[in-house]
Each structure stands twice: as structure tokens, then as C-alpha cells.
Image: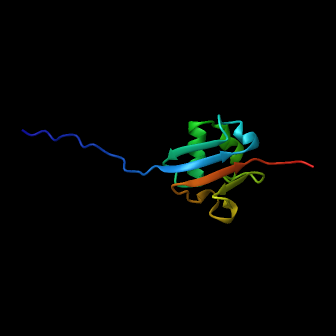
Amino acid sequence: MLIPSPVLSVSLVRMTKVTVHVYATLGELFKSKHIELRTRAKTVKELIDFLSAQYNPQFKELLIDANTGCVRRSYKILVNGRDIDFLDKLDTRILDGDGVAFFPPVGGG
């Protein structure tokens, strides 16, 4: 009697190399203000989830309004220098080699 061998599942999901820049008070949540990483995240929302899980859960709490699921009004996120508000918001795709910058509210006078 032949016993079938177990099937091995190999994940072929491509890892995306992303450079993350976190400024001012957001940078204090991380050990560095500039992070180069590899992730399976394909959108800005997935990247925020990844960063929150891997580095600091407060990151998502500060950026995302829990009631609306949107970026809080006073925060800005740029992908390759372009504001995601003018792209696909949190569904903006990130590609291999992209730079994503997170800016907290700024004030002054």
C-alpha cells in the first residue's frame, strides 16, 4: 500500500523593498527615522499594518481614525513624494524600491 507524501506549500509571494521615512514625533516610535525593509505589503494600508505589528502598535493608532478607517486629517503620507490623498489614499499601491514618508501634524508660528 502506498502512502501519499505530504504536500509542501511554498509561498511564492514576492517581498517588496521599501524605504520608510518617519518624521518628528512619529520618528520617536521607531529606533530610526529611516527604515529599509522587505515586506509583503502591497498597499499603504498594509504597510501601516506591517509597521504597527513589527515595530510599534501606537503607529497605526496615531495615523488612522478608528471610527472612519481613514488617515487622520492632520497627518500626511507620501509615496515617492506624492500625497496619497491625490492617489488612491490608503489603497495606494507600493512597489519594489518605493519610498514612503509619514508626517505628523506640524505647528508653529
Asked if residue 10 is positioned above or below residue 92 in the image, the reply reads above
User: Residue 91: x percent and y percent?
Assistant: 59, 59
Q: Which residue lies furthest to the top in this view?
A: 31
Q: Which residue lies furthest to the left in this view?
A: 1
Residue beneath the point at 49% across and 51% down: 16
Q: How is the image coloured?
A: rainbow
Q: Which residue lies furthest to the bottom in this view?
A: 86
- The image quadrant of residue 57 is top right
Q: Number of labelled discs?
A: 0
User: Residue 56: x percent and y percent?
Assistant: 63, 36
User: Residue 12: x percent and y percent?
Assistant: 37, 50
User: Residue 36: x percent and y percent?
Assistant: 57, 44
| Front residue of this view, candidates 47 and 65 | 47
- The image quadrant of residue 5 is top left
On the rendered structure, is 1 left or right of 81?
left
On the rendered structure, is 19 left or right of 78?
left
On the rendered structure, is 22 left or right of 53?
right
Which corner quadrant holds the N terminus?
top left
Residue beneath the point at 50% across and 45% down: 38
Residue beneath the point at 68% across and 42% down: 61
| Front residue of this view, candidates 22 and 104 | 22
Residue beneath the point at 64% across and 64% down: 87
